[in-house]
Image: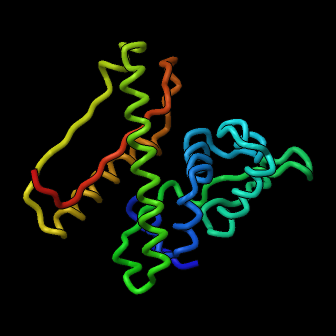
Amino acid sequence: MTSRERPSDGVRTITDAKALSAMANPFRSRMMDALTVDGPSTASGLAARTGQAVGSASHHLKVLSEAGLVQEAPELARDRRERWWRLVDPGTRWSRADFASDTAAVTAAYAAEALTVQRQFERVQEWNANAATVPEWDDAAFATQNWMHLSPTELREVADELIEILMRWSRREVPDDGVERESVFVFSRGFPAQP
Protein backbone atom coordinates (compact mmCIF):
# COMPACT_ATOMS: atom_id res chain seq x y z
CA MET A 1 0.00 0.00 0.00
CA THR A 2 1.25 3.44 -0.82
CA SER A 3 0.31 6.45 1.26
CA ARG A 4 1.82 9.59 2.66
CA GLU A 5 1.64 10.41 6.34
CA ARG A 6 0.99 14.00 7.31
CA PRO A 7 3.13 14.30 10.42
CA SER A 8 1.65 17.66 11.42
CA ASP A 9 -1.87 16.32 11.81
CA GLY A 10 -1.72 12.51 11.60
CA VAL A 11 -4.18 12.48 8.71
CA ARG A 12 -3.00 10.03 6.08
CA THR A 13 -3.16 11.07 2.46
CA ILE A 14 -4.52 8.11 0.53
CA THR A 15 -2.70 7.42 -2.71
CA ASP A 16 -4.00 3.89 -3.19
CA ALA A 17 -7.08 3.00 -5.26
CA LYS A 18 -7.76 -0.04 -3.06
CA ALA A 19 -8.25 2.16 0.01
CA LEU A 20 -10.51 4.55 -1.91
CA SER A 21 -12.61 1.67 -3.23
CA ALA A 22 -12.93 0.29 0.30
CA MET A 23 -14.13 3.66 1.61
CA ALA A 24 -16.65 4.08 -1.22
CA ASN A 25 -19.00 1.51 0.36
CA PRO A 26 -21.72 2.96 2.65
CA PHE A 27 -21.44 0.22 5.30
CA ARG A 28 -17.64 0.43 5.41
CA SER A 29 -17.84 4.20 5.64
CA ARG A 30 -20.28 3.93 8.55
CA MET A 31 -18.04 1.35 10.24
CA MET A 32 -15.07 3.71 9.99
CA ASP A 33 -17.22 6.48 11.47
CA ALA A 34 -18.27 4.19 14.33
CA LEU A 35 -14.63 3.31 15.03
CA THR A 36 -13.80 7.01 15.05
CA VAL A 37 -16.62 7.91 17.45
CA ASP A 38 -16.72 4.82 19.68
CA GLY A 39 -13.14 3.57 19.45
CA PRO A 40 -12.11 -0.05 18.87
CA SER A 41 -14.90 -2.59 18.42
CA THR A 42 -15.69 -6.15 17.42
CA ALA A 43 -17.50 -7.17 14.24
CA SER A 44 -20.64 -7.84 16.28
CA GLY A 45 -20.44 -4.41 17.93
CA LEU A 46 -20.00 -2.73 14.54
CA ALA A 47 -22.83 -4.81 13.06
CA ALA A 48 -25.18 -3.63 15.80
CA ARG A 49 -24.03 -0.01 15.46
CA THR A 50 -24.46 0.05 11.65
CA GLY A 51 -27.53 -2.19 11.28
CA GLN A 52 -26.01 -5.08 9.36
CA ALA A 53 -25.46 -8.79 9.91
CA VAL A 54 -22.32 -9.88 11.78
CA GLY A 55 -21.11 -11.87 8.75
CA SER A 56 -21.44 -8.79 6.57
CA ALA A 57 -19.59 -6.65 9.12
CA SER A 58 -16.79 -9.25 9.25
CA HIS A 59 -16.52 -9.18 5.46
CA HIS A 60 -16.35 -5.38 5.42
CA LEU A 61 -13.70 -5.39 8.16
CA LYS A 62 -11.61 -7.78 6.07
CA VAL A 63 -11.85 -5.42 3.07
CA LEU A 64 -10.92 -2.41 5.24
CA SER A 65 -8.01 -4.35 6.74
CA GLU A 66 -6.70 -5.40 3.31
CA ALA A 67 -6.87 -1.73 2.28
CA GLY A 68 -4.81 -0.73 5.32
CA LEU A 69 -7.60 1.32 6.91
CA VAL A 70 -8.27 -0.82 10.01
CA GLN A 71 -6.14 -3.21 12.00
CA GLU A 72 -6.70 -5.81 14.66
CA ALA A 73 -6.38 -4.83 18.31
CA PRO A 74 -5.59 -8.24 19.87
CA GLU A 75 -4.74 -6.76 23.26
CA LEU A 76 -8.44 -5.96 23.76
CA ALA A 77 -9.65 -9.55 23.21
CA ARG A 78 -10.85 -11.45 26.28
CA ASP A 79 -10.32 -14.83 24.62
CA ARG A 80 -8.93 -16.35 21.39
CA ARG A 81 -12.27 -16.16 19.58
CA GLU A 82 -12.82 -12.44 20.11
CA ARG A 83 -11.39 -10.07 17.50
CA TRP A 84 -11.23 -6.33 18.09
CA TRP A 85 -10.54 -3.73 15.39
CA ARG A 86 -9.33 -0.12 15.36
CA LEU A 87 -8.62 2.52 12.76
CA VAL A 88 -5.04 2.70 11.50
CA ASP A 89 -5.15 6.50 11.18
CA PRO A 90 -7.30 9.13 12.90
CA GLY A 91 -8.27 10.54 9.52
CA THR A 92 -7.77 10.28 5.79
CA ARG A 93 -7.71 12.65 2.87
CA TRP A 94 -7.08 12.31 -0.84
CA SER A 95 -6.71 14.32 -3.99
CA ARG A 96 -7.88 13.09 -7.37
CA ALA A 97 -4.78 14.77 -8.82
CA ASP A 98 -2.67 12.03 -7.20
CA PHE A 99 -4.45 9.48 -9.42
CA ALA A 100 -4.48 11.32 -12.75
CA SER A 101 -2.82 8.43 -14.61
CA ASP A 102 -5.01 5.70 -13.06
CA THR A 103 -8.60 5.88 -14.31
CA ALA A 104 -9.79 3.16 -11.89
CA ALA A 105 -8.37 5.13 -8.98
CA VAL A 106 -9.95 8.38 -10.21
CA THR A 107 -13.30 6.57 -10.46
CA ALA A 108 -12.86 5.22 -6.92
CA ALA A 109 -11.96 8.71 -5.67
CA TYR A 110 -15.12 10.17 -7.21
CA ALA A 111 -17.22 7.37 -5.69
CA ALA A 112 -15.69 7.84 -2.24
CA GLU A 113 -16.18 11.59 -2.43
CA ALA A 114 -19.77 11.26 -3.70
CA LEU A 115 -20.58 8.94 -0.78
CA THR A 116 -18.99 11.38 1.67
CA VAL A 117 -20.98 14.34 0.30
CA GLN A 118 -24.21 12.32 0.35
CA ARG A 119 -23.64 11.30 3.98
CA GLN A 120 -22.81 14.89 4.96
CA PHE A 121 -26.01 16.10 3.32
CA GLU A 122 -28.08 13.38 5.04
CA ARG A 123 -26.60 14.28 8.43
CA VAL A 124 -27.43 17.96 7.91
CA GLN A 125 -31.00 17.07 6.91
CA GLU A 126 -31.39 14.85 9.97
CA TRP A 127 -30.00 17.58 12.23
CA ASN A 128 -32.32 20.21 10.74
CA ALA A 129 -35.31 17.93 11.23
CA ASN A 130 -34.47 17.31 14.91
CA ALA A 131 -32.65 20.46 16.09
CA ALA A 132 -35.66 21.92 17.88
CA THR A 133 -35.81 18.90 20.20
CA VAL A 134 -32.43 19.79 21.73
CA PRO A 135 -32.40 23.59 22.15
CA GLU A 136 -29.08 23.62 24.04
CA TRP A 137 -27.41 22.04 20.99
CA ASP A 138 -29.42 24.10 18.50
CA ASP A 139 -27.93 27.22 20.08
CA ALA A 140 -24.38 25.77 19.88
CA ALA A 141 -24.54 24.25 16.38
CA PHE A 142 -23.21 26.34 13.53
CA ALA A 143 -23.07 26.57 9.79
CA THR A 144 -20.85 28.93 7.89
CA GLN A 145 -19.87 29.66 4.35
CA ASN A 146 -17.33 32.13 3.13
CA TRP A 147 -16.22 33.48 -0.23
CA MET A 148 -12.48 34.14 -0.50
CA HIS A 149 -10.04 35.01 -3.25
CA LEU A 150 -7.28 32.38 -3.00
CA SER A 151 -4.63 30.66 -5.05
CA PRO A 152 -4.40 26.84 -4.98
CA THR A 153 -1.46 27.16 -2.56
CA GLU A 154 -3.47 29.42 -0.25
CA LEU A 155 -6.46 27.07 -0.33
CA ARG A 156 -4.13 24.23 0.74
CA GLU A 157 -2.93 26.41 3.63
CA VAL A 158 -6.53 27.08 4.70
CA ALA A 159 -7.25 23.34 4.57
CA ASP A 160 -4.15 22.52 6.61
CA GLU A 161 -5.08 25.08 9.27
CA LEU A 162 -8.68 23.83 9.52
CA ILE A 163 -7.56 20.21 9.74
CA GLU A 164 -5.05 21.13 12.43
CA ILE A 165 -7.78 22.78 14.54
CA LEU A 166 -10.19 19.86 14.09
CA MET A 167 -7.53 17.27 14.88
CA ARG A 168 -6.42 19.19 17.98
CA TRP A 169 -9.99 19.18 19.33
CA SER A 170 -10.63 15.55 18.38
CA ARG A 171 -7.40 14.35 20.05
CA ARG A 172 -7.67 16.41 23.21
CA GLU A 173 -7.98 14.73 26.56
CA VAL A 174 -11.67 14.99 27.43
CA PRO A 175 -11.92 16.59 30.88
CA ASP A 176 -13.42 14.56 33.70
CA ASP A 177 -15.54 17.50 34.85
CA GLY A 178 -19.02 15.99 34.94
CA VAL A 179 -20.10 17.86 31.80
CA GLU A 180 -22.14 15.68 29.45
CA ARG A 181 -20.66 15.53 25.95
CA GLU A 182 -22.06 14.14 22.68
CA SER A 183 -20.29 13.08 19.51
CA VAL A 184 -20.28 16.11 17.20
CA PHE A 185 -19.87 16.03 13.42
CA VAL A 186 -17.98 18.94 11.83
CA PHE A 187 -17.18 19.14 8.14
CA SER A 188 -15.97 21.77 5.72
CA ARG A 189 -15.17 21.98 2.05
CA GLY A 190 -13.31 24.47 -0.03
CA PHE A 191 -13.25 24.61 -3.83
CA PRO A 192 -13.44 27.15 -6.66
CA ALA A 193 -17.02 28.20 -7.44
CA GLN A 194 -19.04 31.09 -8.80
CA PRO A 195 -22.05 32.75 -7.15
**Depicted 191 relative to depicted 1: above or below:** above
* Above-or-below relation of 185 to 107: above
Q: Which residue is painted at 37% across and 72% down in the image?
A: 96
How is the structure coloured here?
rainbow
Which of the pair 15/195 is nearer the observer? Answer: 195
Q: Which quadrant does the N terminus fall into?
A: bottom right
Q: Which of the two residues, 61 or 73, is positioned nearer the viewer here?
A: 61
Q: At x 31% / y 23%, what residue is drawn?
A: 140
Q: Residue furthest right?
A: 80
Residue at the (58%, 56%) spot, across then down: 25
Q: In terms of depth relative to the viewer, which is nearer, 62 or 77?
A: 62
Could you say where residue 174 lies in the image, as x and y percent from the top left? 49, 33
Which residue corresponds to the image point at 38% horizontal and 41% vertical from the top-left?
Answer: 121
Residue 73, position as x, y percentages in the image: 74, 54
Whether residue 11 is visible, yes or no, is no
> In the rendered image, is residue 179 in sight?
yes
Q: How many marks?
A: 0
Quadrant hosting residue 138: top left
Q: Nearer the viewer, residue 75 or 85?
A: 85
Pinpoint residue 85: horizontal percent, then vertical percent.
71, 52
Horizontal relation, residue 5 to residue 25: left or right: left
Name the spot of residue 113 as percent of width and height, x first. 42, 59
175 on left or right of 54? left
